[in-house]
Image (cartoon, helix red, strand yellow):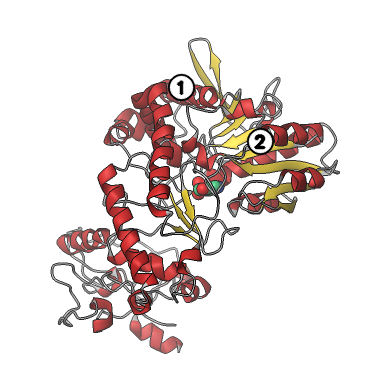
Amino acid sequence: MQSIGRPTQPADTIGVGAPATVLGHRGLDHEEALIFELGASGRCGVDLDTPAPVASRLGPHARKAPVGLPGLSEPQVVRHYVRLSRRNYAIDMGLYPLGSCTMKHNPRLNEKMARLPGFADLHPLAPMSTVQGAFALMDELARWLTTLTGMPGVALSPKAGAHGELCGLMAIRAAHEASGQAGVRKRVLVPESAHGTNPATAAFCGYEVDPIPANAEGRVDLAAFMARLGPDVAAVMLTNPNTCGLFERDIVAIAEAAHGAGAYLYCDGANFNAIVGRVRPGDLGIDAMHINLHKTFSTPHGGGGPGSGPVVLSAALAPFAPVPFLVREGDGFRLVEEAAAGAAPFGRMAAFHGQMGMFVRALAYMMSHGADGLRQVAEDAVLNANYVLASLKDVMTAPFEGPCMHEALFDDGFLKDTGVSTLDFAKAMIDEGFHPMTMYFPLVVHGALLIEPTETESRETLDDFIRVLRTLVARATSGDTAHFAAAPVLAPRRRLDETLAARRPVLRWRPPALDKAAE
Ligand SMILES: *Cc1c(COP(=O)(O)O)cnc(C)c1O
């Protein structure tokens, strides 16, 4: 087992040409060790009274060695976390052009609302009569979601997009069970360009995943789709706009054919940002769609922050929505926890009702934009992406003709014969102060580079980004491969061995002495 010792940084991590420093610091940017490697165990940052002795009932389970917690003073702890936070790139620091992730600015108003004690201090088991305001907010959010999508039902409890997919497919399976067809409907059709969570969800639900190829335009091949339909198909999972940043123009024909074959149409709504306020998915014939509140409706995400993936449902699927759900009763609301008349919930997705903090942020975002503002979100997101596409497509290669929706997709054709890969190119962007775009996704495009600027970026930021990319392309095509092979040279860490980190993650710190003993 390798241990991460107190840093004595080789010049390699400090940057090419930079002097090696005594402690590995780079100017005022401090090198930082793990908290266990700082201070000394046995020390304590607070002054606690010595507890009165108690008779231990742990018997043989009592700990024999010290627990080994880090021992630091309060200022040491504060500095540790502040230094680490400076290493954390964030949407509040600069452009975050990750395609498919919709990394947009999170308005501070949302944060202010989410921190109101009446929302922030609620307990999920508080008596219903005491949380009527929170229920009213959830009901209002549900109204916005069903209105924007033109779908009658919504399940608020799923905690992320992938969780919403599972909710949607479970509702579909429940509907097939109710009509006695669950036994025969075993396949789910998923386009090859789909996000990995789509086939994973279908497989997790016990379905066989049947991939549908894309056509030369980057859209679902309608003829291939029709040929795959049959009486054993449970559902079709489509993303619209798709992960190539293109609108699936045949979606109405796809919905009609799916329904004609007795299947349901699930839509991955992660790209709703491109069409919110412009297109109502219900009008396209969609039966279930998750909405990533943490993408389309701001709310912070990335770095494992909380998500929220409500699922809107058609009239056919709404009765199968999971518990709990809200019903109006008299002047107020009641959270239904058990099957009720007229409903056949397939079960429950989460212990409680969902991510309250995300609900507050999303509704604050919706209400502060208004219906017209949300439409403009979609329009500006599409405009920004097309600005990027149009400004780069003479030097980078776009795999598909024509304008895009909310994200601009390039392949690695422009890097052919340069010795520079998509990964090298992305690493060089880090030295220039830009977080890379999504790489190698969607899989249907070779060496894909997927850029989603979102509507919240300014013209100045996009122009800087474009200027950097054009300069890097010129460097790559002029034969400066070495520049890319070395990149990033200015980041706190150079290239990490991502494969080793994924295959053999070191998740536990051990004191060096124990580590030696284990060898
Ligand atoms: C983000 C995303 C998902 C998954 O959503 P999570 O909230 O990350 O679980 C699914 N599909 C697409 C196209 C996405 O971009």
According to the image, label 2 marks what residue? 251
Q: Which residue ends up furthest to the top in the rendered image?
A: 330
Residue at image position (51%, 18%) is: 333
Position of 383 compared to 321: left or right?
A: left
Above or below residue 88? Residue 145 is above
Using the numbered discs, state the Cα–Cα distance from disc 2 to disc 1 in whole angstroms.
Answer: 29 Å
Q: Secondary structure at mark 1?
A: helix
Labels in figure, total: 2
Residue at image position (27%, 36%) is: 108
Q: Quadrant of residue 30?
A: bottom left
The quarter of the image holding the C terminus is bottom left
Above or below residue 429? Residue 114 is above
Q: Secondary structure at mark 2?
A: helix
Look at label 2 and name its amino acid: Ile
Residue 328 visible in the current orientation:
yes
| Residue 406 image offset from top left, x and y in percent | 46, 42
Q: Please tell me which residue lies in front, 273 or 160.
A: 273
| Residue 442 image offset from top left, x and y in percent | 56, 56
Look at label 1 and name its amino acid: Glu
Q: Quadrant of residue 254?
A: top right
| Residue 225 image offset from top left, x and y in percent | 75, 45
Residue at image position (43%, 41%) is: 294
Crowd band around label 1 with a 10 angstrom C-alpha radius: few (<14), some (14–19), many (20+): some
Position of 17 compared to 335: left or right?
A: left
According to the image, label 1 marks what residue? 140
Looking at the rendered image, the disc whose residue lies closer to the viewer, 2 or 1, is 2
